[in-house]
């Protein structure tokens, strides 16, 4: 069979869905190819946090805020679950408190929507937080929670129904040329192709991708069974360990003190790149993560040591009634050392977009609009 469309998008992860949506709203006819019946990559394995706090200051943070607005529009239009959760980064050590207060008191903190909240106010408002030894926390307003499983499963059907996007799920794209793409059974005549392969750097444009300085990162995650309904973890919770991960805290001397303390007192956390985030999703389950192993072997084995550390760190921050695990998994993303995303142009009619690292959910909707506008 020969099909025809203005735009082909390869990959049904969040980056591909974002590009299919943004192409369709610009009036292009769009066909979306995904290898699996439901996408199985990083987009279904994450926390579902739209987290501008994680973006470096400047252009990327602004892109994250634009994405946040686009997410609200998408979620409302598609009728999907979300929560304007905000996030609370909790401080149990003086150095953590110093780093958080420094940001809260700065112009940058204002841009990031962050304010310092004393421990008493947290205890009065959030009974799910562990207040033992708590010094206070950094409240971050601009955080939205979505359900990644729901987004990946339902957005394609919505794109098809509302925007006429043609879906080809269970269909791997085997080759892309200037104006054609080929699957096992079909050839399509296409004006423009947008390849969003996630961490699959081998199937399409492997030569170009191998030169793109991308690093694999493997993360380990946990999900508890549904908690009783009376227990509500309203904001996303982050521990002080996250100070070491986010560029907005990088210039603070207190953050360097935190990093030195962790390296000295808890080297096992550094060994596995652990920082703690926890969210309660719309099904009342608590999703907990994560660890970071760079360029790790492709074959996954769960590391029980990481599971134990994640649970041990979680209970320092929050008190879910049940720590019974419903699911454990890993996810892999690729990232670039200095760029928030990698946009390649192997042919004038083709873009390859990947490398969004740990912020793909946060950045992809705005990025897609920018890629299409700049074309
Ligand atoms: C554990 C974990 C937690 C995270 N938490 C967050 C978070 O809370 N907030 C945040 O902003 N980001 C988070 N991220 C990052 C985010 O999930 C990723 O950056 C993002 O999902 C990457 O999306 P993608 O579309 O590029 O890749 P993927 O989701 O991997 O999708 C790529 C898709 O392309 C398909 N594909 C590839 N090649 C072909 C082909 N030739 N033909 C057809 N289909 C093809 C694959 O089957 C796959 O479905 C997290 C990541 C992980 C792993």
Image (cartoon, grey):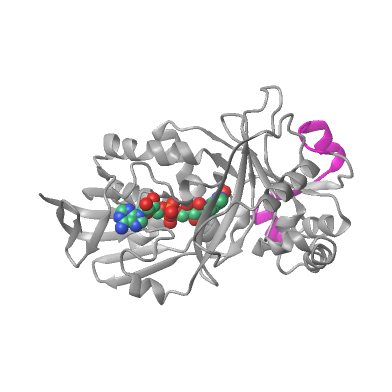
Q: Position of residue 109 (x, y in %)?
A: 70, 56
Q: Residue furthest left?
A: 1
Q: Is residue 298 left or right of residue 290?
A: left
Q: Is residue 200 visible?
A: yes
Which residue is pictured at 81% across the width and 57% down the height?
Answer: 96
Q: Position of residue 289 (x, y in %)?
A: 64, 48
In which quadrant is the C terminus drawn? bottom left
**368 part of magenta stretch:** no
Which residue is pictured at 41% across the width and 77% down the height?
Answer: 211
Q: Residue furthest bottom?
A: 211
Between 251 and 279, the one lying in front of the other is: 279
Q: Is residue 360 visible?
A: no
Between 81 and 357, the one lying in front of the other is: 357
319 to 171, vertically: above or below: above
271 to 9, vertically: above or below: below
80 to 295, vertically: above or below: above
Between 220 and 68, the one lying in front of the other is: 220
**113 part of magenta stretch:** yes
- How many numbered circles are shown? 0
Which residue is pictured at 32% across the width and 60% down the height?
Answer: 195
Using the rendered view, name the quadrant where residue 353 is placed. Answer: bottom left
Q: Position of residue 259 (x, y in %)?
A: 78, 65
Between 368 and 148, the one lying in front of the other is: 148
Q: Position of residue 235 (x, y in %)?
A: 67, 39
Q: Is residue 62 left or right of residue 257?
A: left
Question: What span is colored magenta in the figure?
Answer: 107-130
Q: Is residue 178 left or right of residue 62?
A: left
């Amino acid at each position: 069979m020969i099909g025809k469309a203005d735009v082909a998008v390869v990959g049904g992860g969040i980056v591909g869905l974002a590009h299919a949506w943004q192409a369709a709203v610009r009036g292009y006819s769009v066909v979306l190819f995904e290898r699996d019946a439901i996408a199985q990559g990083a987009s279904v394995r994450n926390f579902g946090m739209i987290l501008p706090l994680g973006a470096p200051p400047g252009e990327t943070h602004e892109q994250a805020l634009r994405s946040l607005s686009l997410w609200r529009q998408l979620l409302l239009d598609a009728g999907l679950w979300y929560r304007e959760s905000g996030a609370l980064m909790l401080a149990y050590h003086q150095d953590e408190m110093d780093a958080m207060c420094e940001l809260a008191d700065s112009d940058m903190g204002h841009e990031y929507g962050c304010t310092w909240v004393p421990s008493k106010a947290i205890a009065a408002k959030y009974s799910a937080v562990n207040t033992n030894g708590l010094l206070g926390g950094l409240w971050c307003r601009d955080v939205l929670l979505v359900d990644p499983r729901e987004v990946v499963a339902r957005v394609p059907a919505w794109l098809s129904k509302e925007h006429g996007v043609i879906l080809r799920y269970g269909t791997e794209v085997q080759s892309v040329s200037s104006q054609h793409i080929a699957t096992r059974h079909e050839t399509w005549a296409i004006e423009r192709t947008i390849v969003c392969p996630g961490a699959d750097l081998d199937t399409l444009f492997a030569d170009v991708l191998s030169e793109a300085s991308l690093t694999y990162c493997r993360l380990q995650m946990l999900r508890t069974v549904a908690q009783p309904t009376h227990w509500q973890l309203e904001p996303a919770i982050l521990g002080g360990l996250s100070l070491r991960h986010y560029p907005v805290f990088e210039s603070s001397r207190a953050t360097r003190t935190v990093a030195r303390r962790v390296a000295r007192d808890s080297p096992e956390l550094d060994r596995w790149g652990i920082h703690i985030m926890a969210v309660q999703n719309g099904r009342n389950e608590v999703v907990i993560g994560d660890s970071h192993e760079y360029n790790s072997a492709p074959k996954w084995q769960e590391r029980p040591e990481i599971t134990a550390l994640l649970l041990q760190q979680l209970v320092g921050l929050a008190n879910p009634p049940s720590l019974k695990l419903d699911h454990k998994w890993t996810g892999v993303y690729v990232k670039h050392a200095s760029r928030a995303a990698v946009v390649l142009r192997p042919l004038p009619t083709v873009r390859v977009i990947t490398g969004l690292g740990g912020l793909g959910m946060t950045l992809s909707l705005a990025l897609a609009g920018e890629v299409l506008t700049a074309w």
